[in-house]
Image (cartoon, rainbow, N blue to C red):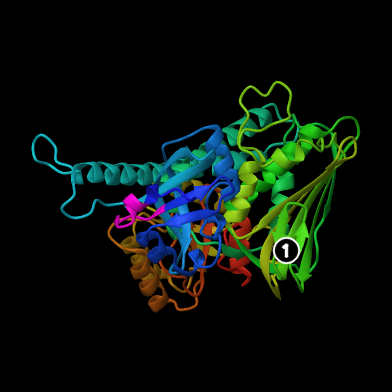
């Protein structure tokens, strides 16, 4: 007999679901049925049918982890007919009936129902708590944006100096360590942006150059003087399919995979990275990854390291699971990679043989048209054109001017949109490119675009963005995410001035 406890929640205003130990939804109240619609129809619907890929791990992994470490309230995301991702503070409780284990999930509404707010001693409602949360979110977003601005100066100047110094210069190691610390701080800023609910809402995946991303990921490890001696083999495919992805998150995933590969090596280590197109005419299973029919871009990272024992392979995507010796603080590991890939609609598969090595394959859904290579050589990033930089942060104006002027460009700066328009109206014939921050006081981004294009319709615009993206894409506009290195800025500028810019993060 199915438990009847959910009957007490049948007419509740919030969705409630009853799961058995296998993840099957035994009962759903009226609010849940209305919200999830056809996903709960039919016999034995499963939690995975409404589980959002933006959660860390699968529905089955969540249930297994929760049973091991119960958490009464947890933030989860679900899919509904009308929306691919809905956030709920979810109350989870377990109980047993007739020797059967069940989980009761209550998807709590974000706002109290009118007339049901709990009263305080002074007659004030939980509206105050809501205001406190909104204030915290605004604070997190502000801190994230300010931190990204500060880090842009640190990363930009550090990478600029590294490019100027000789390979054996005594200061190189210290500058590399500064860059690593800035990279860690950038991750914190990104997490703050995600917490404020602005990061995922405004930052949409864009079509990018995966071969260039792979090359940058490898170079970041090759430039580390403390890295072990490794044979790196990079085999990029020509005419790679066009795939949409979050460049920052995907590079984070690739770096985690490469880090694991390096730590597995002993003796004559070798790491091979290759990209390829994949066209599937029917659903295909690659180890743990289920791939629907369609086009994909695959990045495969293989090593000849110690490999993974067969009994450990099923657990590699568990948070905090590790086989590393002396791992005092095991992190999310491949669980982070899994979360990043599924959040972007992709998949990750792992195969390994002890003593032979490991291969990790990440798949991204793609379109069969090929991505256009930017055609920019990293050996020729100089220029003589005039660039107008617009930012209300003086440190970013200084950083941009230092890097670009050193490569031969003529630089104009403006600390507001109004000042930029005044300069542009006077010198529009001489300005070849406008670089501007997305978030500035007084003049909004759509207003600035409109005025710039009215003065000079064909001038390219490079937007520097932190945790926000514009409400809509604009012709002639390209985006670069903070913080960025001097090389990334120069490559993007060169591509735009050569007429090969696109709307991607680099």
- Residue at point 76% right, 71% down? 282
- Residue at point 44% right, 68% down? 37
In the rendered image, which quarter contains the C terminus? bottom right
Position of residue 395 in the picture relative to residue 409 (left or right): left
Q: What stretch is highlighted in magenta?
A: 7-16
The spot of residue 478 in percent (x, y) is 53, 65
The spot of residue 385 in percent (x, y) is 56, 65
Q: Please, what is the dominant secondary structure of the magenta stretch?
A: loop
Q: Foreground residue, 76 or 380?
A: 76
**Which quadrant holds residue 414?**
bottom left
Position of residue 310 in the picture relative to residue 135 (left or right): right
The spot of residue 400 in percent (x, y) is 51, 51
- Residue at point 33% right, 69% down? 447
Q: Foreground residue, 224 or 198?
A: 198
Query: Could you say whether the residue bearing mark 1 is in a helix, strand or loop?
Result: strand
Q: In this view, does 360 lie above or below 71?
A: below
Position of residue 42 in the picture relative to residue 280 (left or right): left
- Residue at point 37% right, 63% down? 420
Q: Residue furthest left?
A: 122
The residue wearing badge 1 is 297
Q: Is residue 391 above or below residue 329?
A: below
Is residue 8 covered in magenta?
A: yes
Residue 433 in view here? no
Number of residue marks: 1
Q: In this view, does 180 lie above or below 108?
A: above
Is residue 208 covered in magenta?
A: no
**Which quadrant holds residue 135?**
top left
The spot of residue 347 in percent (x, y) is 67, 56
Within 10 Å of the Cα at label 1, are there few (<14), some (14-19), or many (20+) other Cα atoms?
Answer: many
Q: Foreground residue, 415 or 311?
A: 311
Residue 425 in view here? yes
């Amino acid at each position: 007999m199915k438990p009847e406890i959910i009957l007490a929640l049948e007419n509740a205003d919030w969705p409630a679901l009853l799961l058995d130990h296998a993840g099957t939804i035994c009962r759903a109240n009226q609010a849940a049925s209305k919200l999830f619609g056809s996903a709960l129809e039919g016999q034995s619907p499963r939690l995975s049918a409404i589980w959002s890929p933006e959660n860390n791990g699968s529905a089955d992994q969540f249930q297994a982890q929760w049973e091991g470490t119960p958490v009464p309230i947890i933030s989860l995301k679900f899919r509904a007919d009308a929306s691919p991702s809905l956030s709920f503070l979810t109350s989870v409780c377990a109980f047993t009936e007739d020797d059967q284990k069940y989980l009761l999930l209550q998807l709590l509404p974000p706002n109290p129902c009118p007339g049901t707010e709990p009263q305080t001693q002074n007659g004030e409602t939980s509206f105050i708590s809501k205001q406190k949360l909104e204030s915290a979110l605004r604070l997190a977003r502000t801190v994230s944006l300010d931190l990204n601005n500060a880090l842009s100066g640190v990363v930009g100047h550090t990478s600029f100096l590294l490019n100027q110094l000789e390979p054996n210069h005594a200061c190189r190691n210290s500058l590399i360590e500064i860059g690593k610390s800035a990279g860690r701080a950038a991750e914190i800023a990104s997490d703050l942006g995600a917490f404020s609910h602005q990061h995922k809402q405004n930052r949409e995946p864009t079509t990018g150059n995966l071969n260039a991303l792979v090359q940058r990921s490898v170079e970041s490890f090759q430039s580390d003087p403390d890295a072990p001696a490794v044979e790196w083999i990079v085999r990029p495919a020509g005419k790679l399919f066009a795939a949409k992805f979050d460049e920052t998150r995907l590079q984070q995933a690739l770096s985690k995979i490469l880090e694991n590969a390096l730590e597995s090596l002993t003796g004559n280590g070798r790491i091979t990275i290759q990209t390829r197109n994949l066209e599937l005419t029917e659903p295909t299973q690659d180890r743990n990854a289920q791939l629907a029919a369609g086009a994909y871009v695959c990045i495969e990272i293989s090593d000849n390291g110690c490999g993974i024992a067969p009994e450990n392979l099923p657990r590699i995507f568990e948070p905090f699971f590790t086989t590393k010796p002396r791992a005092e603080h095991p992190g999310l590991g491949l669980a982070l990679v899994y979360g990043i890939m599924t959040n972007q609609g992709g998949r990750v598969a792992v195969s390994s043989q002890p003593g032979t090595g490991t291969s990790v394959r990440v798949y991204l859904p793609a379109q069969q048209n090929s991505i256009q290579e930017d055609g920019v050589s990293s050996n020729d990033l100089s220029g003589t054109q005039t660039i107008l930089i617009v930012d209300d942060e003086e440190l970013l104006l200084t950083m941009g001017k230092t890097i670009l002027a050193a490569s031969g460009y003529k630089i104009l700066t403006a600390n507001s949109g109004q000042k930029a328009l005044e300069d542009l109206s006077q010198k529009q014939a001489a300005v070849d490119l406008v670089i501007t921050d997305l978030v500035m006081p007084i003049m909004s981004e759509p207003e600035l675009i409109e005025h710039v294009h009215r003065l000079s319709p064909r001038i390219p615009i490079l937007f520097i963005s932190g945790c926000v993206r514009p409400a809509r894409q604009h012709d002639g506009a390209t985006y670069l995410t903070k913080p960025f290195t001097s090389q990334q800025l120069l490559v993007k500028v060169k591509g735009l001035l050569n007429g090969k810019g696109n709307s991607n993060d680099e």
